[in-house]
């Protein structure tokens, strides 16, 4: 199999989604995701339950990905998998399976950094999106990470700003929980926000370094605000849910954009991309489109299917590494706190 005609199987299992995808010359042939509904009743991901569900899902998900791609496993050129960061138990399932499959098929194994994959998902060939030009700024926003990254090449990335405590996705989900919304609450905040007044209530924006983030204080201010209003009116949330969500979302998005503007100013780079689960949020997408018109930026917003955890982004990194022959040894181990 030549490098120009390779099939890469990507496997993702960093949190609570088991995913597999097949890529061929930059084109995604299949992208299958099995979500785990069991966590909804607990209001968050339970690591032990997540790893057990991965064990149940990984074989059928990989089988379906190969079938949808219309190829046999023996046609695969390499196996790419998420090595980290993520939940250790979940990572172990994907790592162990990938190592075993690569060994059984006698093909190369490629380890992938989950956060790099969110950024490099922009290089998946689609009709809807064009790949960024180097150098560009990437803002990775998810339930576990909030970072601004200067990207000078596929694997030359420098974190120039990041959260000092909680991630933006957690701020959305915890705010939703305070409002009594079910898990995962972030998408519901976005849904209600589209019907509300973003200036109805004011929340403070944390003060940290010019390109760094902090979200713990915002969650606390939302909690105290809701408690105070509920003491005066027990029906306050139900009567004002849209305005509350719109105000929370406006504060978070405005805060993210402040940091991004600082990064553009400091680096002089006006090409900006976003990635991670929160990049599916309508507020941040609209704010980026407005910034493109207002400041002359060139912005890159991924397709919805490439925002949340998926294996297509793992597969594209696998293909890039395959072309440069960057393979992992079979004794490679998962890393819950894997760095760039």
Image: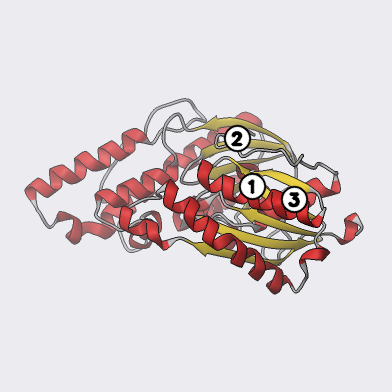
Identify the residue at horizontal 24%, vertical 55% (top origin): 180
Q: Is residue 181 left or right of residue 24?
A: left
Numbered badge on residue 62: none
The correct choice, above or below, for 48 with respect to 24 in the image is: above
The correct choice, above or below, for 215 with respect to 199 in the image is: above
- CA distance separating discs 3 and 1: 14 Å
Viewer-closest of 43 and 165: 43
The correct choice, above or below, for 18 with respect to 150 in the image is: below
Task: Give the mark nearest the N terminus, 3 or 1.
Answer: 1
For the residue labelled by badge 3, is the local secondary structure a helix, a strand or a loop? helix
Q: Which residue is mark 1?
A: 95
For the residue labelled by badge 1, is the local secondary structure a helix, a strand or a loop? helix
The reply to whether residue 195 is visible in this rendering is yes
Identify the residue at horizontal 69%, vertical 56% (top origin): 10
For the residue labelled by badge 2, is the local secondary structure a helix, a strand or a loop? loop
| CB atoms of marks 3 and 1 within 8 Å | no
Numbered badge on residue 318: 3
- CA distance separating discs 3 and 2: 17 Å
Q: Nearer the viewer, mark 3 or mark 1?
A: 1
The reply to whether residue 275 is visible in this rendering is no
């Amino acid at each position: 199999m030549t490098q120009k005609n390779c099939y890469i199987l990507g496997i993702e299992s960093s949190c609570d989604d088991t995913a597999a995808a097949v890529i061929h010359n930059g084109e995604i042939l299949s992208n299958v995701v099995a979500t785990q509904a069991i966590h909804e009743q607990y209001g968050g991901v339970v690591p032990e339950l997540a790893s057990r569900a991965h064990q149940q899902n990984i074989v059928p998900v990989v089988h379906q990905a190969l079938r949808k791609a219309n190829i046999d496993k023996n046609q695969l050129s390499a196996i790419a998998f998420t090595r980290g960061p993520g939940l250790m138990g979940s990572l172990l399932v994907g790592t162990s399976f990938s190592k075993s499959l690569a060994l059984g098929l006698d093909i190369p194994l490629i380890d992938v950094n989950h956060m790099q994959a969110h950024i490099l998902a922009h290089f998946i060939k689609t009709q809807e999106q064009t790949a960024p030009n180097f150098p560009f700024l990437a803002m990775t926003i998810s339930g576990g990470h909030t970072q601004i990254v200067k990207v000078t090449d596929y694997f030359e990335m420098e974190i120039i700003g990041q959260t000092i405590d909680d991630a933006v996705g957690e701020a959305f989900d915890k705010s939703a929980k305070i409002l009594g919304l079910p898990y995962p609450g972030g998408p519901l905040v976005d849904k209600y926000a589209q019907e509300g007044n973003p200036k109805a209530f004011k929340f403070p924006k944390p003060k940290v370094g010019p390109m760094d983030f902090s979200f713990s204080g915002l969650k606390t201010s939302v909690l105290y605000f809701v408690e105070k209003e509920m003491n005066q009116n027990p029906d306050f949330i139900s009567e004002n849910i849209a305005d509350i969500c719109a105000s929370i979302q406006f504060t978070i998005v405005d805060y993210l954009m402040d940091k991004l503007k600082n990064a553009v100013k400091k680096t002089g780079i006006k090409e900006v991309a976003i990635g991670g689960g929160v990049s599916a949020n309508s507020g941040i997408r609209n704010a980026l489109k407005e910034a493109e018109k207002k400041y002359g930026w060139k912005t890159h917003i991924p397709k919805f299917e490439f925002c949340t955890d998926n294996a297509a982004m793992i597969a594209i990194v696998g293909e890039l590494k395959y072309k440069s022959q960057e393979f992992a040894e079979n004794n490679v181990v998962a890393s819950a706190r894997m760095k760039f």
